[in-house]
Amino acid sequence: MTMTMKTTVFTFRQSQSSEEISDLQAHLAQLDGEPFCFLRVSYGDELTLHFGRLHSGISPKTKHRQFGDYVLGVRASRWLLKSDEFLVAPADVLAHSTILPSAFRNITKEELESGTFIGAGSRVLSVTAFVVKQLKAIGLQMVFSDGTALVVLPSERGPDDQEKSGTPELADWDLLTPSGQVSAYPGPRWGFEKKEEKRSVPAK
């Protein structure tokens, strides 16, 4: 993401003695109790959710836009929002659903961003990372105080999805926080960047 901080290429190492996914969970725990601000569809149809206090962007291009203290970006992943009253997901996620097609309707980007599906001010009750063994990737589930839940499932990567040499690897999802950025990648593995410090661990 290129919102309020510059990201760099992560250097990953595979080590049997590295920390487990529980350490990733510790980073995500920062979101517990934080209020939901708004949802935005960004460049490349990336879904972003903003939490905490709002503030203006720091660059000339973003100073007129609002951002949360915490920003969850879902780019190379499938996702769905669900409650007892609705289920919202991209069309490719619902393609194999057992629900009758007549139960679906298309919604616009504006509807998705309107605040209809997650109430403004709803607080994060829990954030849980989990390993999707079939995809060798890390998924995410977030539950809100209004009863809504967000589920993030990484998309399957094929040979054509490999990043070009010399370019940053595309994260399945990432979380921008006041202290740095957490990113989840296939492997499964995850990375944390804090200022100039970079480290990463494989997930088990």
Image: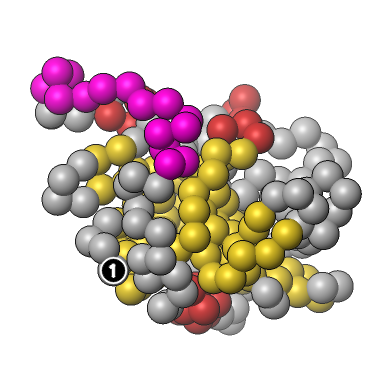
Coloring scheme of the render? secondary structure
Q: Does 79 sit left or right of 45 as displayed? A: left
The magenta-colored residue range is: 100-114
Residue 101 % position (x, y): 17, 19
Residue 88 % position (x, y): 30, 38
Numbered disc 1: secondary structure:
loop
Q: Is residue 83 above or below residue 126?
A: above
Label 1, residues with CA under 10 Å away: few <14, some 14-19, many ≥20? some
Q: Is residue 121 above or below residue 66?
A: below
Image point (76%, 49%), residue name: 64
Q: Quadrant of the C terminus?
A: bottom left
Residue position for label 1: 145
Image point (69%, 77%), residue name: 179
Q: Is residue 156 at all visible to an observer of this figure?
A: yes
Q: Is residue 23 above or below residue 144?
A: below
Q: Is residue 66 magenta?
A: no
Residue 167 % position (x, y): 81, 41
Q: Is residue 101 magenta?
A: yes
Residue 93 % position (x, y): 33, 32
Q: Is residue 14 at all visible to an observer of this figure?
A: no
